[in-house]
Image (tube, coloured by chain):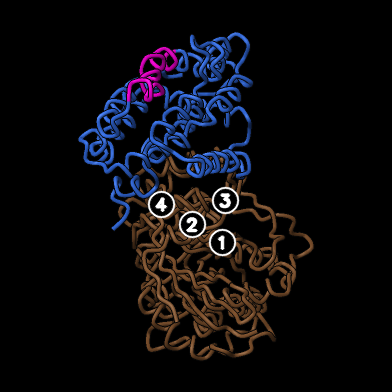
């Protein structure tokens, strides 16, 4: 399996994300407070259930390759963190700093649940759990890879625009610090997963193609319309 | 049960990936949704698609036709008699060169949806599935592109367990497109091609040996709309069946194609044929002539047309191929809550819900709408 193919895919998509007009607007301080808060909301929706998703991957990983995923799950849940704060709690801290009220949190939670429901209920396009697992793994590691390179920039931008403290933005700065390691371990775990489950090169490449047929970073953080505009798909 | 209010939503739903054939490349759905409210509070939804190169309709003309020709006939009229013959109340759908079939299909579907919902029944109960049909098998469609693009799409669809494929071809790249598709899907999968009117009869004949060597099952709309006698000659000289699509819009088209033995297969599409009632009538005519049909779809259709078509595919039971239900494989967001698309193997369960079989989420519909008009 080609590690360079995965990394070049992540690089291409991360570059496109960092060059999209919304990201530029965020970094350039051109987004309104409302738009910045919508961005925070999207981040929370996208990652509120991440401990569950990483647990799913841990469940599928072969025993010789599950150590890094186990560590990742425990860290997501705050068990292996110094201050015992789970990643969803870091997101809640971020939302609270943005003065999200109960109603707004309820909206975020509902949207995150709806995404989880969609993932579980939608017809499976792959024929085996093996292929589903690889696709999810590629996506999760892809986010870690992108966050390890861009989350500090996003955090700094929000710090300026919303006047938040480093502590409020711990989710961003934490990912910037730990995700370099996570992404590295994730890449290795992905390759071992593919080897253990006998995924041939052709299938591997096709699953990468399916998983990254659109820019999931722009889609999750800025929405379908932003992605469509970025691709020139809307008049 | 009388219709009291109509609302037309013109949609623009971005695609996940661009979809191309020789005549057009699309990046967003431009369907329109008809929402009809009744005096009992019931609301029904229908969907239409306008394709100038198929029926002559544009979205603007369809909306105008609905508001000024169809709606005045329906307003406050008791339609609670026969949901499937509602089209007989509509004015003639043909105006000059334009068949307002997309417009009339959309209104018909909205009436059927609300009528059935009022009675707590589903279209699948009015048009029950043929006993042998337990699920629907959909074809995968490979968009017209470079050899590499064809290979990539074909491989994705193969990974999804698809066994029947339709390949969009264009004149410049047809040979490599066919070769790449066949190589990617393997020798046993069913492969047919769609010319989307891009070829002349002579060019089609030149390709016949290519079709034979790659085991092409049929060719859809190889040339632009031509006199049926020209197609009859082409069909005689060609080793594979011709599927009539853009050449087959009205009942008169069907009669002419049948009488001239101009094709062997007909592509039925709800929005192209003018609704469920007209489509069933056409299917009966084709069947009684001893010919075959497939049930096609419109690129970018939402769950509304997909749901109605799935019930029809199950009811007819003998469609050679079924297309559609691409849902979120193509649309970045559909307008129903749960994805309405086939799964692995191109397989999808039969409809079992009330109305047309899908629940529209208002928030999603509004997000997809770029213009609304109402009366």
Identify the residue under disc 2: B364
A232 relative to B186, above or below: below
A115 relative to B212, above or below: above
Observer-nearest residue: B256 or B129? B129
Mark 3 or mark 4, which has the lower sequence index?
4
Viewer-nearest of discs 3 and 4: 3
Segment tinted magenta in the rendering:
A165-184
Horizontal and vertical percent position of residue A115: 54, 41
Binning the other alpha carbons within 10 Å of mark 2 as few (below 14), some (14 to 19) or many (20 upward) gives some
Q: Which chain is brown?
A: B
Q: Is residue B148 visible?
A: no
Mark 1 element type: loop
Viewer-nearest of discs 4 and 2: 2
Q: Are marks 1 and 4 in contact (CB under 8 Å)?
A: no
Q: How many angstroms separate mark 1 from mark 3 (CA)? A: 11 Å
Q: Are marks 2 and 1 in contact (CB under 8 Å)?
A: yes
Q: Are marks 3 and 4 in contact (CB under 8 Å)?
A: no
Viewer-nearest of discs 1 and 3: 1
Identify the residue under disc 3: B339
Identify the residue under disc 1: B360
Quarter occupied by the N terminus of chain B: bottom right
């Amino acid at each position: 399996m080609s590690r360079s193919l995965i990394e070049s895919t992540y690089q291409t998509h991360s570059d496109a994300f960092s060059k999209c007009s919304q990201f530029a607007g965020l970094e350039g301080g051109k987004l309104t407070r409302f738009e910045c808060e919508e961005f925070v909301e999207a981040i929370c929706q996208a990652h509120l259930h991440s401990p569950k998703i990483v647990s799913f991957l841990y469940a599928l990983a072969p025993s010789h390759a599950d150590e890094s995923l186990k560590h990742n799950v425990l860290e997501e849940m705050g068990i292996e963190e110094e201050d015992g704060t789970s990643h969803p709690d870091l997101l809640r801290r971020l939302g609270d700093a943005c003065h999200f009220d109960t109603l707004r949190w309820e909206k975020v939670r509902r949207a995150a649940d709806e995404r989880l429901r969609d993932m579980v209920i939608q017809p499976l396009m792959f024929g085996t759990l093996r292929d589903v697992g690889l696709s999810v793994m590629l996506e999760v590691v892809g986010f870690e890879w992108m966050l390890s390179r861009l989350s500090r920039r996003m955090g700094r931008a929000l710090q300026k625009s919303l006047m938040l403290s480093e502590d409020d933005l711990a989710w961003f700065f934490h990912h910037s610090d730990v995700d370099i390691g996570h992404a590295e371990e994730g890449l290795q775990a992905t390759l071992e997963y593919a080897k253990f489950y006998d995924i041939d090169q052709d299938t591997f490449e096709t699953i990468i193609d399916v998983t990254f047929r659109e820019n999931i970073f722009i889609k999750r953080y800025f929405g379908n319309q932003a992605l469509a505009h970025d691709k020139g798909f809307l008049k | 049960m009388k219709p009291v209010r109509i609302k037309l939503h013109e949609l623009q739903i971005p695609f996940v990936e661009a979809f191309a054939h020789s005549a057009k490349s699309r990046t967003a759905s431009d369907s329109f949704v008809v929402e009809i409210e009744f005096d009992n509070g019931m609301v029904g939804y229908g969907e239409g698609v306008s394709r100038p190169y198929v029926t002559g309709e544009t979205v603007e003309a369809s909306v105008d036709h609905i508001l000024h020709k169809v709606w005045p006939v329906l307003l406050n009229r008791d339609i609670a008699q026969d949901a499937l013959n509602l089209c007989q109340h509509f004015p003639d759908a043909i105006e000059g060169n334009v068949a307002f079939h997309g417009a009339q299909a959309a209104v018909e579907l909205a009436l059927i949806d609300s009528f059935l919902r009022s009675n707590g029944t589903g279209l699948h109960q009015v048009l029950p599935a043929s006993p042998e049909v337990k699920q629907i098998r959909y074809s995968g469609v490979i968009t017209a592109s470079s050899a590499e693009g064809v290979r990539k799409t074909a491989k994705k669809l193969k990974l999804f367990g698809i066994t029947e494929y339709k390949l969009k071809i264009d004149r410049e790249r047809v040979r490599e497109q066919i070769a790449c598709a066949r190589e990617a899907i393997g020798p046993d999968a069913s492969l047919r091609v769609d010319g989307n009117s891009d070829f002349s009869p002579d060019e089609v004949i030149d390709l016949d040996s290519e079709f034979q060597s790659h085991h092409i099952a049929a060719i859809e709309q190889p040339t632009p709309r031509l006199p049926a006698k020209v197609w009859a000659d082409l069909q005689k000289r060609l080793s594979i069946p011709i599927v009539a699509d853009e050449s087959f819009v009205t009942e008169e088209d069907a009669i002419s194609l049948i009488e001239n033995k101009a094709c062997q297969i007909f592509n039925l599409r709800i929005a192209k044929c003018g609704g469920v009632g007209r489509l069933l009538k056409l299917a009966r005519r084709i069947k009684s002539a001893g010919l075959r049909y497939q049930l096609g779809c419109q690129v970018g259709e939402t769950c509304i047309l997909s749901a109605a078509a799935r019930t029809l595919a199950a009811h007819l039971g003998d469609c050679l191929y079924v297309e559609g239900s691409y849902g979120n494989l193509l649309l970045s967001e559909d307008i129903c809550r749960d994805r309405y698309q086939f799964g692995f193997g191109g397989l999808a369960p039969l409809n079992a819900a009330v109305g047309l079989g899908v629940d529209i989420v208002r928030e999603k519909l509004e997000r997809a709408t770029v213009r609304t008009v109402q009366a």
